[in-house]
Image (spheres, rainbow, N blue to C red):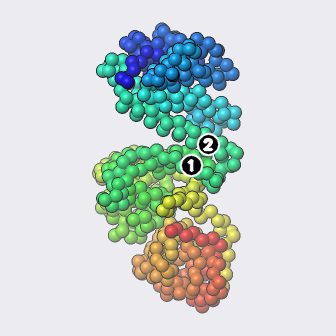
Amino acid sequence: MGDPKIRRAIISVTDKTGVVDFARALSSEFGVELVSTGGTYRVISEAGIDVMPIEELTGFPEMMDGRVKTLHPKVHGGLLARRDLESHMKDAEDNGIGMIDMIVVNLYAFEATVAKPDSTFQDCIENIDIGGPSMLRSAAKNHASVTVVTDPSMYDSILQEMRENGGATTLETRRKLALKVFETTSAYDNAIYNWMNAQINGDTAFTDDKRVFLQKAQELRYGENPQQKAAFYRTVADPALASGSNPDYMLANAKQLQGKELSYNNFLDMDACWWCAREFTEPTCVIVKHQTPCGVASAEDAATAYQKAYECDPVSAYGGVMAFNTKVTAAVVQEILDNKQFIEAVIAPEYEDEAIELLKQKPKARVLVTGGCNHAGSGYEFRTVEGGMLVQEYDSVSEDPATFTVPTKRKPTDAEMKDLLFAWKACRAVKSNAILVAKDSATLGMGGGQPNRVDSARYAVEHAGDRVKGSVGASDAFMPFPDSLEVLAAAGVTAVIQPGGSIRDGEVIEAADKLGVAMVFTGHRHFRH
């Protein structure tokens, strides 16, 4: 069977961009009989284009506030009839059903409706499209004969193909358009399912059936290594997963202002530093290399925070990725330039105009802006294992310091306590087993990813060098033996914060008292595997 010439089209769209021009071209250039519904009919007819209302085709009025208008055998029979089967064509003729060769349909704006804070439950229900998806599926199923158009961006290419093909589209095009239909309707149904699931079961990610819908944002040159293919996908908003987060502020939706395309490893490093920076309320800079912080610092302004973070480990900071939880000023960028620091990427909620101008001196550096910060603990994270996926709430240091206890004889000074609270937040971003030393709201050294905690302590103090004297330490989980505490104290650490809870807590507390070290128990651990 050859490509069928388009003789009749139904047009029913929520997004009316370009629909008048498209309808006019179908009618005037190709003599297509147009049928339309509701608001679309009014727009087309008021433009002076000959168009038939849907009730004239079906013999039934639109009813029930538009809930029933296209659900009729004269619509779906005209879409589903196989032109190559004599029995189908006889059924159509016996029942007065004419063929429909094209539909132009896009759906009620359900996702936009549920995103509005003032939308009621009933508003959302009324924006669940029934007739639209039904027509789309019928037309897509019968794409051997029917052209189905779902997006205004397709109008020009469809018209051009009809001009080149005697008023018809090609089978190759119709197949691609049918695939687009099922992509559209599956995403639409997924959005409805997620919304209704949240309404009925609450904002929980842990329902028996979890559907994660991803949309490809970009191809990547390669993955972690050149032999691995890779791409970046955005998760489609799910009310149960957002948990109070503003999607606009997420890394996945950040706007790139300059620089080379982002790589697979860039995304991982940016996620690590952005995740850490959002833990803090005071101006904070986080520098990450290979998903490991090499400098974290808070200060009264972003420029000072950057310089303190950089000084933690200038060698590792070279070629690193940076995140700020506050506006990046020109002073920040000038410090970067003065340090002659090579940076892969920087992400922040906003930038001064002068800062953007100065960053142009590093044209290859990726510069991303989010517009704001979500709290580090909001939402859920997914990690894959072979044949499955783990889902958990994001971790954050949300515990109240007023609940912390001090089991040692010596209590931390106010200055030590301030640094302990900073170190406790910063330590969460280091791979377990994590030990971190800090002073004046800046990291000095850290050890993480080691099979035992005492080695992490050794790495932390070795990296801090002479700066470790008078600093504080943090451990992401309890100290099972006094050995890691002894390493810290021998280097000059004066106070330590840790969860507590080991069966040997008594031994560790006794060692701290002998060493004159103040110790704070938080009651919470913060593993990062």
Q: Please give the name of the residue rendered at 55% of the width and 75% of the height, measured from the top-left corner.
A: 475
Is residue 15 or residue 342 the one in the foreground?
Answer: 15
Q: Which residue is mark 1?
A: 211
**Three-letter amino acid code of the residue under disc 1:** Arg
Given the current orientation, which residue lies at the most extreme bottom position? 514
Tell me if label 1 and label 2 are in contact, CB under 8 Å: yes
Q: Quadrant of residue 190?
A: top right
Q: Which residue is mark 2?
A: 193
Q: Residue 75: where, in percent of width, then height?
A: 55, 20
Q: Residue 105: where, in percent of width, then height?
A: 51, 26
Q: Please give the name of the residue rendered at 34% of the width and 70% of the height, measured from the top-left corner.
A: 315
Q: Residue 222: where, in percent of width, then height?
A: 33, 55
Is residue 291 or residue 362 the one in the foreground?
Answer: 291
**Three-letter amino acid code of the residue under disc 2:** Tyr
Q: Quadrant of residue 29?
A: top left
Q: Please give the name of the residue rendered at 47% of the width and 74% of the height, measured from the top-left corner.
A: 448
Is residue 180 or residue 327 the one in the foreground?
Answer: 180
Mark 2, residues whose alpha carbon is within 10 Å: few (<14), some, or many (≥20)?
Answer: some
- Residue 462 image label: none
Q: Residue 7: where, in percent of width, then height?
A: 43, 15
